[in-house]
Image: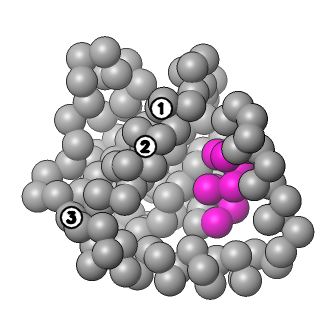
Amino acid sequence: MAHPVILFDGVCNLCNSSVDFVIDRDPEARFRFASLQEETGRDLLRRHDLAPETMDSVVLIEEERVYIRSTAALRIAHRLPFPWPLFSVFFILPAPLRDFFYDLIARNRYRWFGRRETCRMPTPELQARFLD
C-alpha cells in the first residue's frame, strides 16, 4: 500500500472524531481510512490475519506491517506535523502499560463518547481518502 491505512470503529463518536483530527492535521493526505465494520476494513484485517469479529482497536497498516492499540495511535501521531510527534516519547513505556490505558478508554468509549447508528459517510471532498 502506498499510503498508511487507519482502520477505525465507524460507529464510535470518539473514533470518528479521531479520524477528523488526523484529517485536519494531515495536509499531505498521507493517510487513508476504512471502517472496521465495512467490507474493505474487514478484508484488510483478514489479509493481515486479524479476526474482524474480535477487532475493536484502531489498526494502522503501514508498509504491510500492522499496528494496533496504543502502538497504532502513537505511530499515527508520529506521522503528523509538530507537535504531535512529541507523543512518541510514550514509546519508552512498555506496550502492556500503554495498552492498559488504551483499553480503559476503548472499553468505555461508547458510554463516555456515544455511538452512531451507522458508519460515517465521508464528504465528497474526502471520499478519495476513504477506502469503503
Q: Is residue 87 above or below residue 76?
A: below
| Distance CA(mark 3)–CA(mark 1) | 20 Å
The disc labelled 3 sits on which kind of residue? Arg
Disc 2 and disc 1 in contact, CB within 8 angstroms: yes
Q: Residues within 10 Å of mark 2 (few under 14, many from 20)?
A: many
Q: Residue at x 80, y 49 (%)?
A: 86
Quadrant, the N terminus: top right
Say which label, 3 or 1, has the lower sequence index: 1
| Distance CA(mark 2)–CA(mark 1) | 6 Å
The disc labelled 1 sits on which kind of residue? Ile
Say which label, 3 or 2, has the lower sequence index: 2
Q: Is residue 109 above or below residue 22?
A: below
Quadrant, the C terminus: top left
* Applied colour scheme: one colour
How many labels sit on residues?
Answer: 3
The disc labelled 2 sits on which kind of residue? Val
Which circle marks residue 19 in the picture? 2
Instruction: Classify residue 84 by image quadrant.
Output: top right
Q: Residues within 10 Å of mark 1 (few under 14, many from 20)?
A: some
Q: Residue at x 72, y 82 (%)?
A: 96
Q: Residues within 10 Å of mark 3 (few under 14, many from 20)?
A: some
First to last magenta residue range: 70-78
Q: Residue at x 51, y 50 (%)?
A: 47
- Residue 43 in view, yes or no: no
Query: 35 and 23: which one is in front?
Result: 23
Q: Disc 1 marks which residue? A: 23
Q: Is residue 130 above or below residue 108?
A: above
